[in-house]
Amino acid sequence: MEKIGGYAFRERHGFIVRPWMGSKQNKEQIMARLVRILAVLCAGLGTTLATQAQSIDDYANDSIKRLSDYLKIDTINPPGNESRGVKYLGSLLDEAGIPYESVESAPGRGNLWARIPGDGAVGGDKQPALVLLHHIDVVPANRKHWSFEPLSGDVEDGFVYGRGAIDTKGLGIAQLQAFLALAASGEKLNRDVILLATADEEAGGFFGAGWLIEHKPELFADVGYVLNEGGSGRVFGDQIAVLVEVTQKVPLWLRLTATGRPGHGSAPQMQTSVTRLVRGLKRISETEFPVRVIDPVATMFEGLAPYQIASGQAVVPNIREAVNDNDYLLEMKLRNPGGHALLRNTCSITTLQGSPKINVVPAEAYAELDCRLLPDEDPETFLHELERIINDPNIAIDKIMGFTPAVSRTDTPLFEVLANVADEYFGATVIPTVAGGFTDSHFFRDLGITSYGYSPFAFAPREFAGVHGNDERLAVEQLRRGVKIYYAVLRQFTVRP
């Protein structure tokens, strides 16, 4: 045991404090020596931490296991249970030492957000914040039609398997890893960057993004930009085009209720609620609404045409002229129903309900329609047109859900960054596009916030087929590269010069 002043040090057993017996001068010398020892230890620790600092490649590699674990968490909507996903994402933020907040809009319907604060640009004010948005919930999956367990999260043959791999847990993990890398970089940012994971997008977002905007408006007070799902790179042969969604068709979900005299199934009537409803639905199914090519759709078709032609597809670049050919429209409806749907309003008959008993003629029968309107369509005008088509006063039309249209401009610094990164990583052009489906972006566009549907992945047609379909999966290399691409976007848009 070595004695230094009043301290007795023992090998392997720390030290014992005893009453001080030396002079004041001796005490000061000892304390100075201890301070130097601590300084050396701290310097060594700093060196060790620096050598252990993660590179963007490390964050990209870690994304595989993290997505696998995320996919194993059951957040199928209904019922959602997104709080399970919040707990998982929160554990990753805790591990990185990043504070976050979360809230349930209803029991089990969790939402989470974290913020990297910016300190403003040199010589100027802090720029509007950027939100990285993905939704935690996923759509149901029927195991009978899958070749693997939908919530397996298996990593095999170069893919991560599971419902939500693309829509949108894969995107969420890419955003998270890029966000963590940006936070760890220690770079000075010109704006705040917010990571936002929400509930309920697959059912309209009313327990997620919509609820947060209504109940937590302060969260978005300084937000100017949102990057969300809705666009991605598309592979055409040996070329890639990067699609960035700037607007979308407007959902108008309707319930049709037909009424009639109830009775016994053994005594058929001339007209019943069911026969009225069937006749009305037949009229709707046989109606093709007028073709109208809006400007964003024309821009999208024109931008995609060179890629489609290069990959051997039959394409007419001038869509405004092509739609005058009925044969072209029919071929497109058969070959590319998603593209065809962008040329007109549409209604799909999705649910039917009559009597709960086979021998009872019901007093009421119901059907639900998933109608999607072009962004410049007036919903009330469309409803009047639908009433005229049905032409039955005994069928009532009620609105289940409807959104407002909005288009995000492309002459922004963020769009310019997306174009730069697309060229850097893919040698690709960015094409503004219109989505046939809807996302939570409309909530933010209603607030005047520029919102883009953007994904750092590039899909061949067969890779994208699993979204809302069977055997959804994401390539491991897609995810690794996607983390790096997203990080490049964040650095170019947020790092202070």
Image (tube, grey):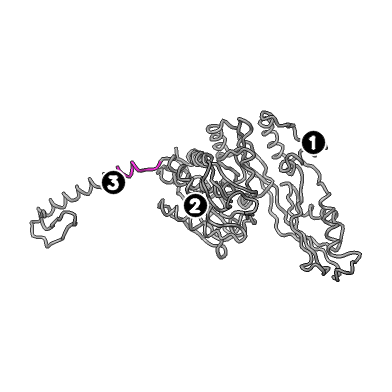
Marks 1 and 3 sit apart, C-alpha to C-alpha, by 69 Å
Residue named by callout 3: 45
Q: Percent x, y for residue 349?
A: 76, 54
Label disc, if present, on residue 69 of the rendered structure: 2
The mark that comes first in sequence, 2 or 1, is 2
In the rendered image, the vertical position of residue 177 relative to residue 142, given as above or below: above
Marks 2 and 1 sit apart, C-alpha to C-alpha, by 46 Å
Near-viewer residue (431 or 200): 200
The mark that comes first in sequence, 2 or 3, is 3
User: Element type at marker 1?
Assistant: helix
Identify which residue is drawn at 51% across, 48% down: 173
> Quadrant where the N terminus lies?
bottom left
- Give the magenta part as a residue range: 45-54
- Closer to the eye: label 2 or 3: 2
Residue named by callout 1: 328
Q: Residues within 10 Å of mark 2 (few under 14, many from 20)?
A: some
The verdict on residue 106 being magenta is no
Identify which residue is drawn at 56% across, 33% down: 426
User: Element type at marker 2?
Assistant: helix
The verdict on residue 48 being magenta is yes
The mark that comes first in sequence, 1 or 3, is 3
Amino acid carrying mark 2 in the image = Asp
Near-viewer residue (426 or 189): 426
Amino acid carrying mark 3 in the image = Leu
Amino acid carrying mark 1 in the image = Tyr
Q: Percent x, y for residue 232?
A: 60, 40
Marks 2 and 3 sit apart, C-alpha to C-alpha, by 32 Å
